[in-house]
Amino acid sequence: MNDADDLPLSPVSEPGEVGLVAPSDFVSKESFVCDSGQVLPGYTLRYETYGRLNAARDNAILICHALSGDHHCAGIHSLSDRKPGWWNNLIGPGKPVDTHRYFVLCANVIGGCQGSSGPASINPATGRAYGVSFPGVTIRDMVRAQHRWLQSLGVTALHAVIGGSMGGMQALQWAIEYPSFVRRVIAMATTARESAQGIAFNEVGRQAILQDPGWNGGDYPRNGGPRVGLAIARMMAHITYLSDAGLDRKFGRRRRAVATTPGTATVTAEPAANEAAGAAATEGAGTAPGFASFEFEIERYLRHQGQSFINRFDANSYLYITRAIDAFDVAGEGSLEQAFAPVQAESLIVGFTSDWLFPPEQNRDIALALLRAGKRASYAELNTDLGHDSFLLESPQLYDLVRGFLR
């Protein structure tokens, strides 16, 4: 168990920013029994921390990431790689999740592919990547794996758990699974059970991967595999994160002239060295026969999203994590009120008017069920046309909600 003074401290490079950060690995050598009954001989979680754990060890805030996220939610990794973490606008000195006040942590989920144990990890029994022999994981498995990690750091309680989308599912599961450990929950743009529509979207993405010859039954080399299928899955999913109004404002029907051969492949299958190379590889590609003289800006944008994704994500992890999302149902055969009976945390549930993946009514239902179960809960609905991804984008209203609730 680490002493509080030995925990990582993020240097601040400029006001309002956590500065340069570096990931760490928690390695558990104890076996881990998944909800499926399958057993991992041990596991690794890659994580980052920002700020300091206080002497009482009770100022920790856990950030839970969504499907395509990871442990890098704030700061930058190097002066040459200045891409900030995915929630950098929310986390940092003086920001809503204030690293002067709180010790902030985020881990890549089990089943992931950014340093945590997942299908791309080496199976010690075979010396090869697990592939589809990796145990199936659930949202509850993700939370239980994180709990073991937090205990190793000496965290005795969580001031809050915060997450959006799949991160919100984890936040709810935390409040149910470890009620005395969690004081506050902020769940945004989420649901208490995946809907049939959500499952349908995920299944289309999975089939794009499974039908790609490069998938090869889940046995493919690192930096190889079903890259076209994964890119298409990402393109389709990304549409569900946006909204019609937002897309129309950003792209409309704007188009650009291209010089290309009709029938060019929509997404390149060859590995790209980095995101810039991926963007270049998709430039002008994929126009349909008969329309070779132009492409719509939205087409180009989606191809870029697909190419960027395949350069950082593993196809098998995509299959596993979307399956975990689909299986998520906190009530099971009972009621939400019964499911929330163990909860002790105070909860803030946030919905967004233009989110059609996890619409406001699904978020509102969570808050109402918590209230009916006698819990302390509040609901906020923000009017935005940015779709499901609204929780990730600049929003002074959201910042005020989070700051006030945490304090």
Image (spheres, rainbow, N blue to C red):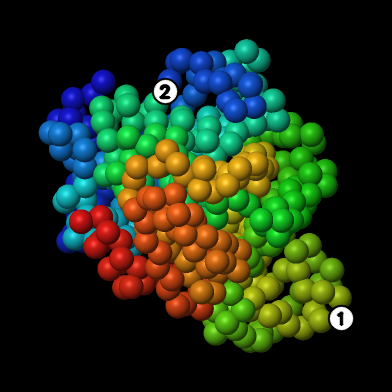
Q: Earlier in the sequence, mark 1 or mark 2?
A: 2
Badge 1 density bin: few <14, some 14–19, many ≥20, Cα 10 Å? few
The three-letter code of the residue at mark 2 reads: Val
What is the C-alpha distance between the residues marked 1 and 2?
Answer: 55 Å
Residue 118 place in picture, x, y as percent: 57, 32
Pick whichever, 56 or 269, lies toward us: 56
Pick whichever, 133 or 168, lies toward us: 168
Count the marks.
Answer: 2
Quadrant that contains the C terminus: bottom left
Q: Is residue 223 left or right of residue 361?
A: right
Q: Residue at x 48, y 70 (%)?
A: 352
Asked if residue 57 is positioned above or below residue 363 in the image, the reply reads above
Label 1: element kind: loop
Asked if residue 197 is positioned above or below residue 108 in the image, the reply reads below
Q: Residue at x 28, y 28 (%)?
A: 153
Residue 183 place in picture, x, y as percent: 29, 44
The three-letter code of the residue at mark 1 reads: Gly
Q: Residue at x 74, y 31 (%)?
A: 219
Q: Quadrant of residue 307?
A: bottom right
Asked if residue 371 is positioned above or below residue 389 in the image, the reply reads above
Q: Quadrant of residue 226?
A: top right
* Residue pointed to by mark 2: 27
Asked if residue 171 is positioned above or below residue 267 in the image, the reply reads above
* Residue pointed to by mark 1: 290
Q: Is residue 340 left or right of residue 104?
A: right
